[in-house]
Amino acid sequence: MTKLHPAVADKPGVMRTTGWEDYALIDSGGGRKLERYGPYQVVRPEPQCLWSQNLPTAVWDKADAVFDPTDEDEAGRWRFKVKPKDSWPMAWGDVRYMGRFTAFRHLAFFPEQAANWAWLNEKVRAFDGQPKILNLFGYTGVASLVCAAAGAAVTHVDASKRAIGWARENATLSGLDDRPIRWICEDAVRYVQREVRRGNRYDGIILDPPKYGRGPDGEIWKLFENLPKLAGLCAQLLSDSASFLLLNAYAERISGAALAGLLSDKLSDRGGTIEWGELALTQDDGTRDIGMSFYARWTS
């Protein structure tokens, strides 16, 4: 039988996130970026910002919070001018969520993912009927809530009880408690293996794994070792009428081309198309893009 290999785009794309009411990339340079998260201006390290900053140092010095890294794995500590709130409400479209200063330089969501959120919103709304969506490594749930708000039934999986708790709070804040969202605190590989055995299927899958992680029972996740197996299992979970599989990865040694090659291999009998490239944050003045992660996405 001839395999219906997906058609892979011959050129990479750049999915750009520009600022919105609750977020902006104000300036960048010198290995750092100056951002606005709701009421707070924040300085965080960003090694890819090899250029010089545009704005005067005096502007940067007015930031409410600065993250000082202690190693290359995102650990460090925050310095605040005035003690901030533990959390504060933010929004993207119809979805509301809480911003938080976490111990790993992030603020409880990844703004560059807004480009993916917009794409997911379109894909879910275009589906004929109510699609079943699986979101693996779902973190604080913004992507899950975008899909739920667009009309999907969502299964949200994350290994962190704290992240699941924050995601549920975000669902309440968004007024989406009555939507069909299942919250699963479990190792992603273990959950997907069980879903394959059960014969469950999904119309769309979001796969956004970390470079390294631990499951609730001590399972070890390593991106380069474990992603091929998980991608293959996810391919088995796609329904006959599936619309998409979106794969995103943050790792210095990965590329959009590598992710596209992986999806092409695992979805070799599904046809469709695969686009691939980079997610980028666009500076408010439009002069610069900061590449943040890589993506590949299969569509039927």
Image: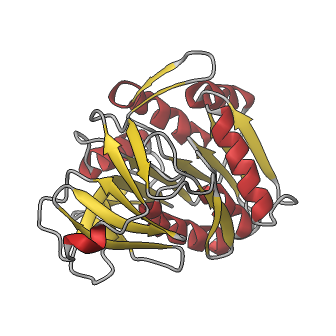
State the residue in front, 244 or 222: 222
**Residue at horizontal 57 percent and vertical 60 percent from the top:** 243
Q: Is residue 146 above or below residue 295?
A: below
Q: Is residue 297 left or right of residue 254?
A: right
Q: Residue furthest front?
A: 82
Mark yes or no: residue 68 visible: yes
User: Percent position (x, y) of residue 155?
Assistant: 71, 46
State the residue in front, 72 or 176: 72
**Residue at horizontal 53 percent and vertical 74 percent from the top:** 22
Q: Is residue 14 above or below residue 132?
A: below
Q: Is residue 82 left or right of residue 2?
A: right
Q: How many marks?
A: 0
State the residue in front, 96 or 265: 96
User: Percent position (x, y) of residue 245?
Assistant: 51, 52
**Residue at horizontal 17 percent and vertical 70 percent from the top:** 53
Which quarter of the rendered picture does the N terminus lie within? Answer: top left
User: Percent position (x, y) of residue 236?
Assistant: 57, 37
**Residue at horizontal 12 percent and vertical 67 percent from the top:** 52
User: Percent position (x, y) of residue 221?
Assistant: 45, 25
